[in-house]
Each structure stands twice: as C-alpha cells, then as structure tokens.
Amino acid sequence: DRLKTGFQDEAKEVDKEWRRYIEIKIMDMDMELSCTIGMANIKAEELLGLKVDDVIILDRNPGNNTIVKIEGIPKFKGSPGSCNNRKAVKISERNKEGKKMNDSNDKTEENNQANASTDNASAKNEKYDMDLILDLPLDISVELGKVKMPVNELLQLGRGSILELTKPVGDPLDIYINKKLIAKGEVVILDDKFGIRVADIINPVDRVKSLR
C-alpha cells in the first residue's frame, strides 16, 4: 500500500508539472488579431469586373466600431486611430455580434462547399452554366491591419486597451475574399456609409483562383 501510494503521489507531481509546462507554453503562444472596418457582398461577375478607383460600399458607417477578431473570431469592438505612427484600435467593449458574424461565415462556407459540389458535377457533365457561376454571392471584408500577441497579453485586453497594428499610418487597407488578399484600397464615406476605393487589385485570373 505504501509503495502504491508513493507511485500515486509521484504521478500527481508529474501531472502538476506537466500541466504547469502546458500552461506556460499556451500563455506564450502568439495569436493573430485582425481589425475589420466593414464587410460587403458582391457577385462573382462584379469581382471580375473590379478595377482601380471603383468604390465598394461596406455594411458599416462611421458611427460603428471596428471589429477586432482573434484568429478570425470576433471578440472586441473598438475605434480606429493611430499610435507611434502605426494604425491602431482602442478597445471599447467586448463584441456581442460574434455568433451572428460566425453564422454568416458558416453560411458562406456552406455556399462555397455547395458551389464546389456544383462545379464538380458540372465538370463531370462537361457543362458549365456561366450565368450561375457569375451570379454567385461573395463576401468581402476590409481590414485595417493585423498584429500578433501572446495569450498572456490577450487576457489583459479590455476597455481602453490600445492595439498597435503592424501597418503604418497612410498604408492602404487590405481587401479580402474567402480569406485571400485580392486588393488594397482607401476608405471613403458615401451616403453615411464606409466605402473602400480600390487602389490596387490582382489580375482577373488570380481573382478566379481566389474563389476556390
């Protein structure tokens, strides 16, 4: 019994040390934060026709907060600004629209999977309905910038915290489709809505690849 108890005590000590080791490693892990100023929905045909100086109207207005995502999951809201000549966001509150936005992302993923199935079926039949393909809805997101931060610092974020992003002040914003960077642009305001004026965009062939 004493021998058995000794082994159990030793196992508990090893388990505690292992858990402490894991906790330390997790706390030191870097997580990516991205700050989204708005989103939009366009058709594939519109994507292929996008050119420099075109303006995409977003779903948010200047009175709305920027959404701060951690590894793609909305966690905070904040107001954009600058810090040390870099773009920054001052956190104002925890995000309560995360589930709604995730549901939207889930639907987009379902649409993409459905579209992929449709494309596969079309390939087998060697028939392509271009009108259907060009009518597909696509989600666009516009990011102010990103930054990586260890978990132990993430846990300290709250109202009033300043997120200093890696993008310098004056740099264009990033425009994504299906999590792929397809263009860069600058913010404009039209009809009380944020818009993004395209300053640079990848060629049409690469845009088609971004749909996959």
Image (cartoon, rainbow, N blue to C red):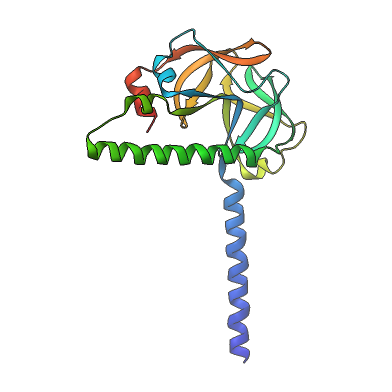
Residue farthest to the bottom?
1
Q: Quadrant of the C terminus?
A: top left
How many marks are shown on the rendered structure? 0
- Horizontal side of 39 relative to 159 (left or right) equals left
Q: Residue at x 57, y 52 (%)?
A: 25
Answer with left or right where residue 125 lies relative to residue 68.
Answer: left
Q: Give how far across and how far down residue 100 sits, in percent.
A: 63, 39
Residue at left 25%, top 32%? 127
Q: Residue 99 location, x and y as percent?
A: 64, 42
Query: Where is residue 129 drawn, in percent x and y?
Result: 31, 28
Counting from the top left corner in percent of width and height, residue 79 is at 71, 24
Residue shown at 35%/17% (left/top)? 203
Name the quadrant of the N terminus.
Answer: bottom right
Q: Quadrant of residue 44?
A: top left
Residue at the far top: name it.
Answer: 53
Along the viewing direction, whichever of 32 and 66 lies nearer the viewer: 66
Q: Is residue 95 above or below residue 61?
A: below
Q: Residue at the location (75% across, 37% down)? A: 158
Task: Give the vertical position of 45 relative to 20 (above or below).
Answer: above
Query: 202 or 107: nearer the eye?
Result: 107
Position of 113 with respect to 84 (left or right) is left
